[in-house]
Image: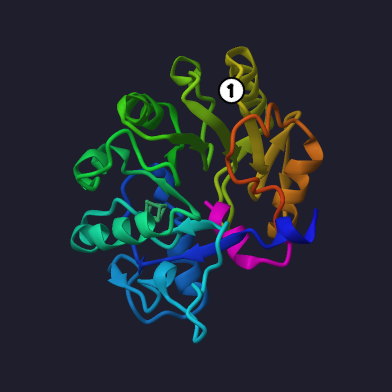
Amino acid sequence: MTEENKNIFADWNPWHGCTKISEGCKYCYVYRQDEMYGSMKASSICRKTANFDLPIKRKRNGSYKIPSGKVIFTCFTSDFLLKDADEWRNDCWKMIKERKDCWFYFFTKRIDRLEKCLPSDWGEGYDNVLIGCTVENQSRADYRLPIFLSLPVKHKSIIVAPLLERIDISRFLDESIEEVSVGGESGYHARPCNYDWILDIREQCINKNVPFRFHQTGANFIKDGKVYRVKRALQRPQARKANIDFGIGKNYIPDTAEYNEEDDNMQLRFDI
Ligand code: SF4
């Protein structure tokens, strides 16, 4: 990993707090983190953060606080398409548009709200916006992915996490999907993730020539019928060790494998 790679990421959480919407939210990392850090406010109450306008904040010398070229992980302590944030989102789109020199990447479980949340000049999509549609089981894949495929988004990824059962997404894999990233669930109560399910999705991706990434094992990992309790710090390295990624680098999706292992926020991004 080069020094340059280590520093390409930035975080922007314009609001914090979210409401649970599907099975994948059961042990939501935002709720877990709030509890861990003793937050007195309910995690389900969405509020603007002090960093709301971070992408356009400037230093004393006039330059942007977030330098040019960064991949900005957007709204990872909520859902960017949450209804409670409707009145604030347009200001975010304006900032995203102003910062054409950076990439903005958000994941959502509310892809069915995207159309009504888009700015009027979205057209076929902003070049610098990547959207990850999250699915956790067959039912959510069958509901969300056809919607995702039908939407004008320039850069699309599918985040299969936390993977809760064997699922078939093969019919949703076409050339518009730039990456499928798969992982198990973290946390004390994590539901098990079976390596066979991961290999199955990998196979589906290879058959459709869609890049595939195994990003983390999750805390309860089943391999060859044996259950392993994997410590949080080892969940990503163990996935990397499996060495089963496919086609990565074909499209420009931020290379989250090139992360700084000391970076807690990077863990949080995938701690789902
Ligand atoms: S942040 Fe994500 S996982 Fe948590 S409640 Fe919202 S949609 Fe669900």
Q: Over which residues does the magenta segment extend?
A: 260-272
Q: Residue at x 36, y 75 (%)?
A: 49
Q: Locate residue 86 relative to residue 43 in the image: left or right.
A: left
Asked if residue 75 lies in the magenta stretch, the reply is no
Q: Position of residue 265 (x, y in %)?
A: 58, 65
Q: Residue at x 63, y 47 (%)?
A: 218
Task: Say which of 54 and 40 sits in front.
Answer: 54
Q: Locate residue 201 relative to residue 126 in the image: left or right.
A: right
Residue 44, image quadrant:
bottom left
Q: Locate residue 194 relative to residue 129 in the image: left or right.
A: right
Residue 18, image quadrant:
bottom left
Respond yes or no on whether mark 1 lies under 8 Å from ligand 1: no
Query: Element under label 1?
Result: loop
Q: Position of residue 153 (x, y in %)?
A: 37, 35
Single out the residue that lies furthest toward the bottom: 60
* Up/down of 265 relative to 27, above or below: below
Task: Say which of 72 and 16 sits in front.
Answer: 72
Single out the residue that lies furthest toward the front: 61
Residue 139, image quadrant:
top left
- Residue labelled with disc 1: 210
Q: Position of residue 158 (x, y in %)?
A: 49, 34
Task: Say which of 57 and 175 sits in front.
Answer: 57
Q: Position of residue 85 (x, y in %)?
A: 24, 61
Amino acid type of the residue that numbered disc 1 sits on in the rendered structure:
Val
Q: Residue at x 68, y 34 (%)?
A: 249
Q: Locate residue 224 relative to residue 183 in the image: left or right.
A: right
* Up/down of 139 relative to 261, above or below: above
Task: Say which of 120 and 229 sits in front.
Answer: 120
* Up/down of 241 relative to 205, above or below: below
Q: Residue at x 77, y 46 (%)?
A: 238
